[in-house]
Image (cartoon, grey):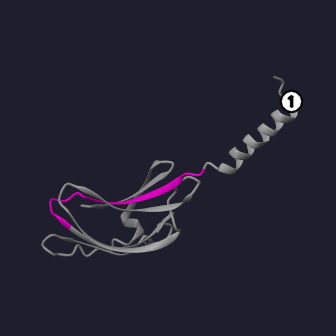
Amino acid sequence: MVISFATIMKKSIILLSVFLFSGCDYLMVWDYSVSNNTNDSLIIEYSSNVRYDIDDAYHSSFDTILIVPPDSILKLCEKGSLGGIVSDIEIGDSISVFNSIEIRRFDSISLNENFMLRSKWKYFETHKRLGNYILQIE
C-alpha cells in the first residue's frame, strides 16, 4: 500500500488544526478560607456574589457557619475564566467576592473588625491554577 504525499499532508493539516483549535485552557480557582486560631467558637455570617464559569453569571448567596476551634473552614470558591495562571485578583481596598462578612464569638460578642478589608486577608498560590485567600482570626 502506497500513501501519497498529499494524503499525508491532508492528515497532518487536520491533526494540526485539531491541536490548534482545541485549546489548552484550564479553570482557575480562588479559595476563600477563615482560620480560627482562637479558643472560641466563631459564628460567620456572609453574603457573596460568586461568578461561576459555567454560565458566566454572578450568583448571590448568604450563609451562616459555626467554626469550632481549631478548625479552619473553606468559605467559598470563585471560579475565574478559563486560561492563564492565577494571580491576586483582589486589587482594591476590600475583598470583592463578599457583599458583607461579620464574625462574632459564639456568645454573640462581635469581633468589631472590618473583615472586608483586603489587608486582613493573606494571599498565596498553592498551584499555578489555584489561589488562596486566608483570613486568620487570632
Instruction: Give the residue drawn at x 70%, y 46%.
Output: 18
Is 15 positioned to the left or the right of 10 in the image?
left
Residue holding disc 1: 4
Q: Quadrant of residue 104?
A: bottom left
Q: Is residue 23 magenta?
A: no
For the C terminus, give its image quadrant: bottom left
Q: Amino acid at mark 1?
A: Ser
Q: Nearer the viewer, residue 69 or 49?
A: 49
Q: Position of residue 44 (x, y in %)?
A: 25, 70
Q: Quadrant of residue 122?
A: bottom left
Label 1 Cα crowd, 10 Å radius (few <14 / some 14-19 / many 20+): few
Is 103 positioned to the left or the right of 49 in the image?
left
Q: Position of residue 6 (x, y in %)?
A: 87, 35
Q: Nearer the viewer, residue 17 or 106?
A: 17
Residue stretch in magenta: 25-42
Instruction: Give the residue drawn at x 61%, y 48%.
Output: 24
- Residue most extreme to the front: 1
Magenta portion: prevailing SS class: strand
Q: Is residue 28 magenta?
A: yes
For the N terminus, give its image quadrant: top right
Is 52 positioned to the left or the right of 122 in the image?
right
